[in-house]
Image (tube, grey):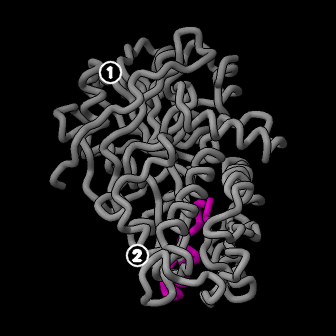
Amino acid sequence: MSRVRRIGGAAVVSVLLVALAACTGQPRGQVDASSCASPGVTDSEVRVGVVYTDSGALSAPFAPARAGFEARLAVENEKGGVNGRRIVYQPRDDGGSTAGNLAVSRDLVANYGAFAILQSSATTSGAAKYLADEKIPVIGISAEEVWSSYRNMFAFAYLASKGLPVDTFGRFVKEHGGTRAMVIGTSTRLTGSDLNSHMVKSLRGTGVQIDEANPVVEFLPGVTSAARLAQRMVDQKIDTVVSGGAAADIAEVVSAARNAGVRLKVVLTATAPDAALLEQYGQVLAGLVFFEPFTPFESENPGLDAYHKAMARHAPEISDPNQTVALAAYINADMLIRGLQEAGPCPTRQGFIDRLRQVHDYTAGGLVPTTDFEADFGQLRACYAFVRVAADAKHFEVIDPNYCGTRLSG
């Protein structure tokens, strides 16, 4: 099976938290690094905390994050680090709970003295206020709306957002023949209902029809009847299925719809099916489309080449590096490095935050569309890579590596 990736997390999307700055009023480049006395910063190193979910119900999708973090930091440390300082880190497992996230984050700041925190978890909200109050830079996966609330938190993409909706998803559906859509939500922790609400607005904003009284149809695998939903599609003449969740969450519904004779022109989800799901459903999932906020693994890209080399060298335990959470964590670590570079030879937490917010052209070496950490703060991306399951249901094809829409007024 060619380059079918295992999915870690619900949409990807991700970012590392970090704090940087100049610790004196002297001009950048004229500060003696040995005199810097910022928390977590010594003459030879910068301490970073790594928080990810390695146990509990959410461990499977988030576990690969540690390898992505480690690979990117190891590459930088081989070059001598940033301004002569190696980046050292302490990993902590939050167990997939908000209480656990707060406990380990507090320990990393109070006892380890972390300069910044890298987060790969769906429960970052547990520590968000504490880390904001302490002015700790945070970079990570924006799996919760809280990422768009605190300016010390950095992400390269937001799927859970308080910002404006975009017409990108509706425009894509319409261009591919979709006219009447059913938006399916699930109770899975990783599939944010917030993204489904954005999907609804995107579809409405482009003239794709949805049920006005019940715009998001909840489906719980094993509990809700997929056959009944399929009959509802027949009755409503549905030709499009959209979900802000994972392909695995709606595969049963898509199968039932096809069995009921529903001619689906578009099936769109926030994450790809993994190899096991393709093996289970086969041709049923052929043509399913998913979107990604970074360069898809199927692309020829120097940034992806660097990522694969780094993973092979520094994370050989990951047999398949084509995992979205691992790549997102790698990008997050790269954001941390960029922030430290911007902060200068004597970084401070507030300085890191201020300087990184002023970066308007971040691309992670070509892995993500150009990101403005100020203008894009808390906002959904308007551009994504759209990828589909090929006709043989054994590999993926890139439809458009950078399909763009516009932000809607509300």
Label 1 and label 2: CA atoms lie apart by 47 Å
Residue 256 seen anywhere in this rendered image of the structure: no
Q: Residue at x 47, y 59 (%)?
A: 155
Give the vertical position of 366 relative to 403 (above or below): below
Quarter of the N terminus within the rendering: top right
Residue linked to disc 1: 239
Indicate the amino acid at tag 1.
Answer: Asp
Q: Residue placed at 70% from the left, 81% from the top?
A: 43
- Asked if residue 278 lies in the magenta stretch, the reply is no
- Rendering quarter of residue 105: bottom right
Name the foreground residue: 116 vs 313.
313
Percent coordinates x, y for residue 128 in the rendering: 52, 76
Taking the spot 54% from the left edge, 25% from the top edge, the residue there is 300
Image x and y of residue 63, in percent: 73, 52
Residue 210 badge:
none
- Residue 354, labelled with which disc? 2
Which residue sits furthest front?
Answer: 30
Residue depicted at x 53% and y 59%: 335
